[in-house]
Image (spheres, rainbow, N blue to C red):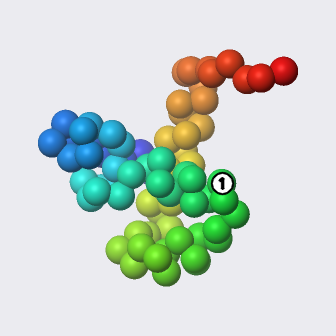
Amino acid sequence: MLTRITIDPEICHGKPTIRGSRLLVTTVLELLASNMTWDEIQADYPGLEPEDIQACLNYAVQLAHFSTIPLAA
C-alpha cells in the first residue's frame, strides 16, 4: 500500500506525494482532518484513487509509530 507514496527530491522538494504527482500526502491528510469525505476529496482530485487515500492514512500511522511531537497540556 505504501508503494503509492513516493518521495523524489525533484518533486515538491522531496515531500511525500501520491504516485509521483504533485499532490502532497499532507494535503490529503488535511482534507480528511477537515471532515471531507473520501468521495468529496476524489471529486476535487479526479485522478486520486481510494487506495491512494488509504495509503496516506497508513503513512500517517507509520509516522506516528516512529515520531512524536509535544502537545500542549
Say left or right for 61 vs 16.
right
Say left or right for 27 vs 15.
right
Q: Position of residue 18 (x, y in %)?
A: 35, 55
Q: Position of residue 35 (x, y in %)?
A: 70, 63
Query: Which residue is at 44% across, 60% downward?
Result: 52
Query: Which residue is at 56% across, 21% downward?
Result: 67
Which residue lies under the disc numbered 1? 33
Q: Position of residue 23 (x, y in %)?
A: 35, 58
Decide if residue 49 is in sight here: yes
Instruction: Give the residue at the far left of this rendering.
Output: 10
Identity, as a three-letter code, of the amino acid under mark 1: Ala
Report which quarter residue 46 is drawn in: bottom left
Q: Nearer the viewer, residue 47 or 50?
A: 47
Q: Position of residue 1 (x, y in %)?
A: 44, 50
Question: Which SS class for mark 1?
Answer: helix
Q: Is residue 31 above or below residue 49?
A: above
Query: Which residue is at 34% across, 50% downward?
Result: 17
Report which quarter residue 21 is drawn in: bottom left
